[in-house]
Amino acid sequence: MIGKCLVFLMVFLLGTKAIVNAQDLVKGKKLYETRCLVCHQADGGGVPNMNAPLDGSSNVVGNNIARLVRIIKNGYSEKIALDGYYYNNVMTPNPDLKEADIANVLSYVRTSWSNKASKITLAQVQAALKKK
């Protein structure tokens, strides 16, 4: 009887975690659509010479999570070379975004379109924001 209860509890907890992860991506998509889509487009393709693409971008799927977090939070105003192209439009800062929001939108972007990168955790966002 105890064994069955433990199995049920484990299945329930794993299922709950899957639902939470799915909700996080839904929240991330909603944030993307309201905050990012205008510049980076519905397909993540960006705008040539202005707004960098997010789909297939080495920056987005790369390992420098802290840089991505800081760009979302603080913005970016320098011309950037990315995957052989240059982009020079200003990325506006988002100081009002909560840490969980940043994790959600980055997780959405890193797993959308052709991107197959890992999701971003709240702990990764918090660690990135502690670094200056």
Image: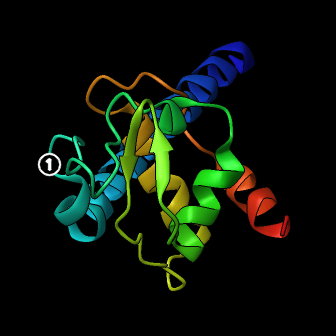
Q: Is residue 49 left or right of residue 115?
A: left
Residue 25 relative to residue 128: left or right: left
Amino acid type at mark 1: Ala
Vertical relation: 33 (above or below) 14: below
- Rendered-image quadrant of the N terminus: top right
Q: Quadrant of the C terminus?
A: bottom right
For label 1, count other residues whose C-alpha is less than 10 Å away and answer few (under 14), some (14-19) or many (20+).
few
x and y, in percent, of residue 98 in the image: 55, 75
Viewer-closest of 55 and 25: 55
- The residue at the far right in this view is 131
In this rendering, is residue 22 above or below 128?
above
User: Which sits in the foreground, 27 or 54?
Assistant: 54
- Residue at image x 50%, y 85%? 96
Image quarter for residue 13? Answer: top right
Q: Which residue is mark 1?
A: 42
At x 23%, y 62%, the residue is 39
